[in-house]
Image: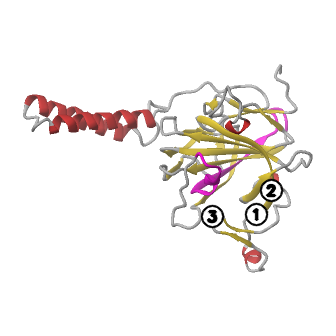
Amino acid sequence: MGLFARGGTLPVLLTSSMGIAALLVAVYVDPVMHLVTLTGVLTLMLSAFLANFFRDPDRPIPKDEGVLVSPADGHVMFVVREMANGRRPSKEELSSGDCEENPLTGTWYPESLAEPLTFENEQRWCKVDKGEESSNDVWRIAIFMSPLDVHVNRVPEAGKIVRMEHRTGKGRRRGPFLPAFKKESEFNERVRTVLECATSSNSTGKMRVEVTQIAGALARTIVPWSGEGDVMRRGQRYGMIRVGSRVDLRVPADKFEPQVIGADSMNPDFPKGQFVNAGSTILFRSTGVSEEE
C-alpha cells in the first residue's frame, strides 16, 4: 500500500501543485495585492489537511491466537453487552401488522432472529442488565473517528465476508446525519459487514462478527474496497469513511471478553475512552485463550 489511501493521491498532488503554482506566480509575476499569495497558502493548507486525512500507515498486525483487532483508529466511546429484541422485517412480516415504527430508526419486527449471532439481518439491540445475561448476547465496542484520525478501516479477524449491507438511514434520502460521537448516530447512513471466521486456527468451527461503518455529521461517504465472498486476512484494509465518523464491532459475548476501556466507564485515565489503532490494538480476547498463550 502506498503513502495514501485509495483515491487520496490525486487530490493531495493536485492541491499541493496548485498552491505551489500560486506562490510562484505571486513571487515572479504579480501577487495582486497579496491575493495570489493568500490563495497559495490556503491551498497548501488544504493539501496538508488532505494528506493527513488520506494517510494510510502500515501497521503491525498481532499474531496472537483468539484475538480480534480494532477495525478503526479513534477513541472507544463505549463497551456494552447487548441482546437482540427485534429485526428488520421480511415482506410477509411487513404486511402482518405486527411491526413497530420508529421515526429515527425505521421499521422493526419485534422478535430477534432465531439465531441472533448469525447476524444475517440488521437487528435491534438493547443493553443487558446485570443478572440477565444469555448465550445469545453480544459485546459491542463503538469507536469514534475524529477528522484528524486515520480513516482506513481494517477487518478484525481473518475470514470471509458473507454479508455487506448498505442502509441510508431514516427521514432523509441519505440521512439522518447525527454527530458520530452520539450513541443515536448508529442509525445514520451505514454499511454493515458480517465476517465468518474460524473459532481458532486449528478448528473447523465457525463464528460471525459484525462490523458497521457509520457516517457522521461531516462524513457523507463510506467507501467499501471489498465485497461479499471476499476472503480477508486479519487487519486487512477493506474500506474507509471520509471525514469524522464511527465504527461499531459486535462479537459473541460467550466467546470473547473486551480488552479496552470506553468513555462510558468514567475512568479518569481515559476521559475520552482509550485510543485504539486499526489493525494493531486488540479489542477482544477469546475466553478460551489465556494471555500467556
- Residue 145 versus residue 5: which sits nearer the camera? 145
Magenta residues? 181-203
Mark 1 lies on residue? 87
When the figure is inspected, residue 20 is found, relative to residue 168, above or below; the finding is: above
**For the residue labelled by badge 2, is the local secondary structure a helix, a strand or a loop?**
strand
Q: Distance between the residues labelled 1 and 2?
A: 8 Å
Q: For the view shown, which residue lies furthest in the left direction?
A: 29
Q: Name the residue located 62 percent from the left edge and 44 percent from the top edge.
A: 247
Quadrant hosting residue 53: top left
Task: Check if residue 99 falls in the magenta segment.
Answer: no
Quadrant hosting residue 171: bottom right
**For the residue labelled by badge 3, is the local secondary structure a helix, a strand or a loop?**
loop
Amino acid type for the residue under numbered disc 1: Arg
Q: How far apart are marks 1 and 3 (CA)?
A: 15 Å
Residue 151 lies, in percent from the top left, at 52, 39
Mark 2 lies on residue? 84
Residue 283 shown left or right of residue 131 in the figure: left
Q: Name the residue located 75 percent from the left edge and 73 percent from the top edge.
A: 99
Mark 3 lies on residue? 104
Which mark identifies residue 239?
none
Quadrant including the C terminus: top right
Q: Name the residue located 11 percent from the left edge and 35 percent from the top edge.
A: 31
Q: How far apart are marks 3 and 2 (CA)?
A: 18 Å
Q: Do the residues labelled 1 and 2 touch (CB within 8 Å)?
A: yes
Q: Quick check: can you spot residue 120?
A: no
Residue 114 lies, in percent from the top left, at 86, 61
Task: Check if residue 188 falls in the magenta segment.
Answer: yes
**For the residue labelled by badge 1, is the local secondary structure a helix, a strand or a loop?**
strand
Q: Name the residue located 59 percent from the left edge and 54 percent from the top edge.
A: 190
Residue 3 shown left or right of residue 187 in the figure: left
